[in-house]
Image (spheres, helix red, strand yellow):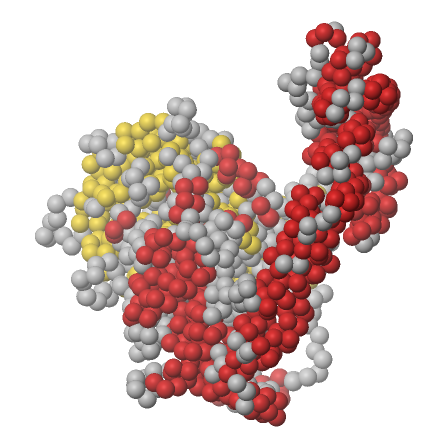
Amino acid sequence: MSWSPDNELLLLVTGQQTLIMMTKDFEPVMERQIHQDDFGESKFVTLGWGKKETQFHGSEGRQAAFQMQVPEPALPWDDHAPKVTWRGDGQLFAVSVVCPETGARKFRVWNREFSLQSTSEPVAGLGPALAWKPSGSLIASTQDKPNQQDVVFFEKNGLLHGQFTLPFLKDEVKVIDLLWNADSTVLAVWLEELQSEENSTVNTYVQLWTVGNYHWYLKQSLPFTGCGKSQVISVLWDPVAPCRLHVLCQGWRYLSYDWRWATDRSSGEVSSDAANVAVIDGNRVLVTAFLQATVPPPMSSYRLLLPQPVNQVAFSTNPQQSNDLAVLDACSQVSVYKCDDDDTSVDPTVKLGAVGGNGFKISLRLPYLEKRYRIRLEEENEVNPLKLSFLTWVREEAFLAVSHSQSGPQSVILRLTAAPPDPADELGQLSVSSSVTVDGIVISLFCNPKTKSVALQLADGQILKCLWESSSLSVEPWKNPAGTPVRFPYPCMQTDLAFVGVEECVLGLSDRCRFFINDTEIASNITSFAVYDEFLLLTTHSHTCHCFCLRDASLKALQGGLGSSHAAHGETLRRVERGSRIVTVVPQDTKLILQMPRGNLEVVHHRALVLAQIRKWLDKLMFKEAFECMRKLRINLNLLHDHNPQVFLENVETFVRQIDSVNHINLFFTELKEEDVTKTMYVPPHPGAARLSSGPEGSKVDRICDAVRGAMEDIDPHKYCLSILTSHVKKTTPELETVLQKVHELQGNAAAVPGAVSAEEALKYLLLLVDVNELYDHSLGTYDFDLVLMVAEKSQKDPKEYLPFLNMLKKMETNYQRFTIDKHLKRYEKAIVHLSRCGPEHFPECLSLIRDQNLHVEALKLYPPSSPQYKEIGMAYGEQLMQERLGEQAGLVFTRCGAHEKALDAFLAAGSWQQALCVASQLRLSQEQLASLSRTLAGKLVEQRRHSDAALVMEQYAQDYEEAVLLLLEGAAWEDALRLVYKYNRLDIIETNIKPSVLEAQKNHLAFLDSQTVTFSRHKKRLLVVRELKEQAQQANLDEVLLSQDSEFLSDTSSVLSGSDLSSKHSHSNSRISARSSKNRRKAERKKHSLKEGSPGEDVALVEALGEVVQGVEKLKDDVCHLLKVLFLFEFDDQGRELQKAFGDTLQLMEKSLPEIWALDHQQNSARPVLGPDSTANSIMASYQQWKSAVPVLDSEPLRPPKINRKTQWKLSFLE
C-alpha cells in the first residue's frame, strides 16, 4: 500500500499481482495487472541504423550478436515483495516486482491514469529497494555485482543512468530501503548485515550520501547493533524539514537527527596556514590546500585513510597549528594528524591526490597520524550511535564535544583530555575531565581562534558562552553591549564569532537566508558568509559577494551596506556566478574560493581583500609582492606611492632593488598620473588611513620620476638606462632634450661599458614612448646635426624631405642657423634671441617677427634702453597697445621712448588727465593750447561720470571756475560747488544755480523713492499670491493622487503620469534652450526668471526684482545725506524733512519685509517633494513631478536677502 504525495490517491498491490487505485475515500478507481507484455508508451523507436547484427562487438566476436541474454533470478535474500515509489509531483509511480516467468526483478513506470509508461531494462542482481527522487529526475535502486554492491539510478524510461558503490564486501550486507530527503539533496541507505555462522549479531547501518560534481560522497554513517534496543525498526525523512531524519528502534526508542551543511576549513590567518578544506567521503577525508593549488572536487591535494567511516572533522583552533586536524569516526575514535616542518616521515594513511606523483616536485607539507584516541564515556549510550557531536579542538590534547541526554531535552558539554599513555595499548584514551548539563538541545558549537571564546546555540536560538578554560566547565548567557542576553530570532545553521568594532559578536545564518549579528537581523538574502581577519564576506541571492571591514563597522552601517544599491558600494561588492557559496579565504593572499551549485570551484580576487593585502604589503615595505599582485589583478600602480608618499620616497631604493626589472619599472612609470588614487579609486576603508596619503606639494609625477631616477643612477645607471630615459619622458614637461643628449652620449660610450644599452636600442625604445615627429623636432632643437640624423634614420621620413633642409642649415652662420631652426620649430622667443645677435642688418626681419608674434615685451629685454632698436620696438609696442585699447599703457611706453605727442594722444584717449597734463607740460604748450586740452579732458571725464575730476581740470588748467561749478552741480557735489563759490566770491551763483539744483535734486529723489515704494509693494503682494497658489496646487494634486489610489479602475501608472503632466507645458522649451548657441544660451539664462504672470519661475523672478529694488535704495544713503545737509544749510527745512521722512519710511518698509520675502524655510520646503511615513509611492512621485515642473532650480543668490547697513548715519537730528 502506498499513498500518493498529495494524499489524493491510494495504490494497493494485491497477492494476485494486480494494482488497485483508490481515492482518498477508499473508492476504487481502476485495476490493472502488474505484469505486462508491452514495454509502455515510451517504447524506443528504431530508425533502422546499426542493427545489432551489424555492430562491432569487440573481443566477443560476431556470435555475441546472436546470443540471447538469460535473465538472472532475484537475489537470495530478496523477499519477492513488491515495492512502490511515487515521483514528487504524484504524476508517475514505479512498481518493482519479481517476474513469475523468469524470476528476475524489474520495475515498471505508470502514470496516475494507470497507463504503462516504460519497463526497466534487464539488470542482473537488481535489488528490491526502490526510491524515486522527489525532483523527478532519477529512480534509485540497488544492484549486486560479482565483487561489489552498487546503488544504481534509472531514468523514467527505464535506462540506467549512473551508480556508486557501497563500502561493503560482496554478500556482506543487504539494502533494506533507499530514502530521498524532501529537497533531493541527501539519499539515505538503510542496510543490514546478512546472517552468517561467524556473525551471530546482525548490525544495521544508516548511511547518508550526497552528490557533488557527479561524485557521490558518504557523509555520515550510523552503525546500530542488532541486539537489544538498538535494532532499527523504521527510518523516515521529515516531509517538512528536509534535513531531519527520524529513526525508530526496538522498544519504541525514537531518534531524531537534524543535519546541517558545514564547511570544515582551517582558521589560521598567518602565512603558515595552507587554507585547508576537508571533505568527508566515507572512510576517507579529502583535504585540499588552497594555498598551494585549487583542486576541483572530487579530487583533492591529499586524502586521509581511516579504518572506519568518518563523521566529523575538526581543525585546530591554535593559529600557529591551524593545519593540524582531528577526525571523529563512526566508532567514536579520534585520529589526530599533525603537520610539522621538521617531520619528513611518510604516513601510509596519507595518500597524495591531484598535486603529486609523475615526477613533479611536491611543495606541500603532508600531515602524519600522531595518535589515535578511544573516547571513554562514563555513561555509554546504548541506542544512539552518534555519541558525540560538534567536536572542537580548543587546545593541545583538549577537545570540547556535545552529548545529548537520554532522559529529556538536555545536552551535556564535555571537555575531553588525553589520559596518560598506556604502553600496552596502541590507542590513547580521551576521558571526560569536566562536564556541564545545559537545559536545551545544542545545535551548534563554535570557537573564535583569536580570543578562544566558545559559544553554544540552543534550539530556541539562545546563545550561551562556555567558560572552558577554568577547572570546571560552566556556561552563562552571551550578552550584547547593552547587557541583555543574545537570542537569535530563528535557529541558525551557520554560526561564528567575530569582532564588530570593539565588541565580540555572534554571527548566524538561518536556513531561510536570514543573517543575524547578535539578535539584530542584518539582511534576509544571504546564502553564505565567512569571517577572515577583519573582514566579513557574504554572498547574496542577487548573485553578489559583499566584503565589509569590521574594524570600524557598526550594525547600522552593515544594514545600510547590504540594503543600498550596487552602485554605491565601490570595492565592497562584486558580481559572482548564480548560486555561489563561500568555501574559504586563503590567508595572507587575495584568493576567495567559491563553490557553484554543481560542485565545481571558482577562484575570485575580491577587490576589498586585494586592496587590504596590498596595503599590508606596502606597510611592510614588501614592494615586490604588492607590485606582482597589482600587475596581475590590474590595480592602478599609483597606489604604490599614494598609499604612503613619504614612506615610498624614503625607501625608493628598496623599491628599485625589490622590483629589479627594467620592464616592470617602465610599466610603473607609464601608469603614473597626478591623481591621488587613495581619494578617488581606492578610498581606504578606515578614516584614519587617509592621513597616510598626504605628500609634499608639487607635481607628484615629477617627484616620483626624479626620486626613482636618482635611485637607479646610484644602483646601476647602465642596467636601468631605459628606465632612466622613461623617467625623463614621463615628467609633466617631458625632458626630451635631456633624453636625446643621453642617447647621444651612449653612442660614444657603448664600447666602454660591457652589457650596456646601445644608442640604437635606446632610440628604438624612445620611439615607442614619443611620436617620431615630435622626437625629430626636439632633436633638431638641440642644434646637434649628428643626433638629428640618427633620429631621422630611425623614423619613416623620406631622406629627400630632411636632407636638403639640413644641408641648407649647415651653410648658415651659427646664430642665424639657430634662428632658422627655432622659427621652423615655432619657438619664436628663442628665435628672436638668436636673431638679435646676428647684427643690425637683420633687425628689420627681427622687428617683423616681433610684430607678427606679439613678442614686444621679450624683445625689449634684448636691447639696451638707449639703443635705437629699443625705441623702434617700443614704438611698435605702443601702437599694438593702442589697437588693443590700452591707452594708458601705450602712453607710458611712448613716454619711455620719447614720443610725447603720441603719448599725449594715448593718455587723452584713456582719460588719464594727470599723465596727459604732465606730458603737456613737457611739450611746453601755450596757454590757449593748454586750455583747449583741458576742455577736451573735462569732456572725456564727464562722459565717464567723473564730474569732480572734470571740475578740477576746468578750474586749475582752463581757469574757468564757473564751468567747474556747473560740473560739480551736475555731479551732485554740493559741498565742492559751495567751496568754489566762496573761494572766488561769487555768491550770486548760489541763488542762480545752486539752490535751484538742490530743490530739483530733492524732487527727483522723492519721485524715485515713490516709484520704488510702489514697485516694491506690488512685487511683494504678487509674490505672496504666487506662493499661496503654488501651495494650493501642490496640495490639490496630492489629494487627487490619494483619491485615485482608492479607485479600482486606475492603475499606478496612470496616477503617476497625472503628476508628470504638470510639467509638459514647459518641458519642450527647456530642451530647445539647451541646444542653442552660447550667446543665445546666455540670453536665455537672463530671461529664465520672467515676471510674466503664470510663468514657471515667476516667484524667483519676483524675489530677484525685490532684491534689486532694495539694493538700489540702499545705495542712495550717501547721496541723500549730502543733499539733506545742503537743504538744511539753505533753510529748506520742510523739503529736508519731507525727503528724510520719505527715505526713512522706504527703508523701514523694506527692512520689515525682508524676513517675509526671503523666508529660507519656505523656499526650501517648496523646493522639496513631500515625504513622510504617511506618504505612498504615488504621492511621492506626484509631489516630485509637481515640484520638478513648478519649482525650477533656485540659484543661490536669490535665496540670500540683500544686506542693509544699519550702521550708516544718514539722518540729520535737527530735521526730525
Q: Position of residue 553 (x, y in %)?
A: 45, 38
Indicate left or right for 1199 with 374 as reference: right
- Foreground residue among 330 and 849: 849
**What residue is at 41 percent from the left and 24 percent from the top?**
482
Q: Where is residue 24 in the image (x, y as percent from the top left)?
A: 68, 40
- Foreground residue among 1215 and 940: 940
- Foreground residue among 747 and 723: 747
Q: How many numbered marks does the figure carry?
A: 0
Indicate left or right for 1102 with 431 as reference: right
Q: Position of residue 139 (x, y in %)?
A: 57, 59
**What residue is at 34 percent from the left and 29 percent from the top?**
438
Q: Position of residue 49 (x, y in %)?
A: 68, 84
Any part of residue 1201 in sight: no
Indicate left or right for 840 with 1143 as reference: left
Q: Quadrant of residue 387?
A: top left
Q: Is residue 215 above or below residue 970?
A: below
- Foreground residue among 261 and 89: 261
Any part of residue 398 in sight: yes
For the view shown, which residue lies furthest in the left direction? 423
**What residue is at 69 percent from the left and 22 percent from the top?**
1204
Q: In this view, does 370 lie above or below 525?
A: below
Indicate left or right for 669 with 624 as reference: right
| Quadrant for the C terminus in the image | top right
**What residue is at 41 percent from the left and 64 percent from the top?**
705
Q: Is residue 1086 above or below residue 1126?
A: below
Q: Is residue 1129 above or below residue 127?
A: above
